[in-house]
Amino acid sequence: MSELSLQHHAWLHLIQVPNFGYGAWSKACTAFSDVVALYQAESARVSACLGAKLAQAITETDSSDLRQRSAAWLQQGQGRQLLCCDEENYPALLHEIPSPPLLLYAQGRLELLQRPLCAVVGSRQATSQGRRDAEQLAYELGQAGFTIISGLAAGVDASAHRGALRSKGSTIAVIGTGIDRVYPAQHRALAHQIAEQGLLLSEFSLGTPPLPAHFPRRNRIIAGLCHGCMVVEANVESGSLITARLAAEYGREVMAVPGSIHNPQAKGCHQLLREGAALVESVEDILTTLGWARPSVVLPRHADATQGEHAGASHPLLDLLVAGPMDLDQLIELSGLTPDEVCATLLSLELEGRVATLPGGRYQRLSEC
């Protein structure tokens, strides 16, 4: 992307305005056709909608430096994008939470946002067993078709990312700094690997340092993006429990791995289990909780003819793709299937070599189907 669009100019300006959040944007939507109309409106009209103080702040805010740096960042490498909350490529699951980010910086494979997503979070001071459990469970979840979301923190987060990177599902890291910074610093190589093989996301402006208040905000994005959230080791004051409870509030499944009663890093998981979280002893427990079958159990096309579409007959999604590549939203709308059903079927068809994923999150039927 060589230049910022006017829409991006508008959003980069508004996210710099003090006290302009999702509530203000929702209110502005009642009076303005789009964000550009708000950005270009006269102060009196903005004041009538949002109040004099906020209108003055919008007028007086200087966002030129951020816009220039953002334009330069977009040009520095492939896979860099801005995801605005009013665009089609903005993650649909985030629209379900009370205060979604207005804008996300993204670097990597955006198509991962269209896959089934599971958060794996836990203690920064995880035991060696906790780190092994997180890495192995993330790997097995990835092999089963899930993309793993975590926060790039030390301990469980990093282990989950590493396990997912070895799998078919890959990983998304939601960070609590500007996307041009890495925290903790020792995860620089891991962050670069995720940017190449997975996806980095941040709602914070370029150059933003790792301040304590940023991590609960990061956690709400992790909770909002996932279909389920699993905690592997956490004490009772861990930020991971905040993520898990937010996930529960958002209607996501919450799971926890139990540990020794003598391990203080297991007490948070035990508390979640007492509150109703699903107990996880193996990846099968996760798949059962999320209502997911392993792709490997899909019958081959030469199976008994009574098995219908898996016996080589055409599938409705394959029939739709005859017309050409389509994205997930088009397939959901035209097929009448649920998002989970479409994602599961596409993954199975991809593993069978009947569908390929294209840049931009589109799917193409392969000629040999």
Image (cartoon, grey):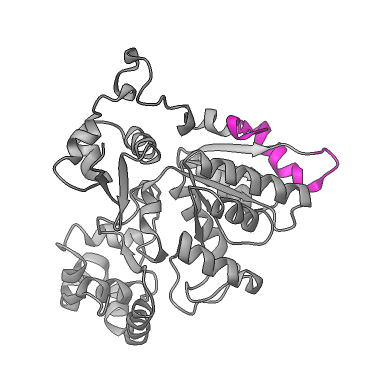
Quadrant of the rendering where the C terminus is positioned: top left
Up the image or down, 84 lies above or below 93; here it is below
Looking at this view, name the residue that lies furthest to the top. 306
Is 259 placed left or right of 298 in the picture?
Answer: right
Number of dots carrying numbers: 0
Residue at 74% over, 53% down: 126
Question: Was residue 109 drawn as part of the magenta stretch in this picture?
Answer: no
Give whichever of 202, 147 is nearer the camera. Answer: 147
Span highlighted in magenta in the image: 260-285
Looking at this view, name the residue that lies furthest to the right. 262
Is 267 placed left or right of 101 in the picture?
Answer: right
Residue at 33% over, 63% down: 83
- Can you see residue 269? yes
Say which quarter of the image contains residue 15: bottom left
Residue at 30% over, 42% down: 355
Up the image or down, 90 lies above or below 133; here it is below
* Residue 40 in picture, x, y percent from top left: 17, 76
* Residue 240 in picture, x, y percent from top left: 62, 51
Up the image or down, 272 lies above or below 172; here it is above
* Residue 101 in picture, x, y percent from top left: 39, 60
Up the image or down, 302 lies above or below 200; here it is above
- Can you see residue 234? no
* Residue 146 in picture, x, y percent from top left: 48, 43
Quadrant of the rendering where the N terminus is positioned: bottom left
Question: Was residue 281 drawn as part of the magenta stretch in this picture?
Answer: yes
Is 290 placed left or right of 313 in the picture?
Answer: right
Give whichever of 273, 140 is nearer the camera. Answer: 140
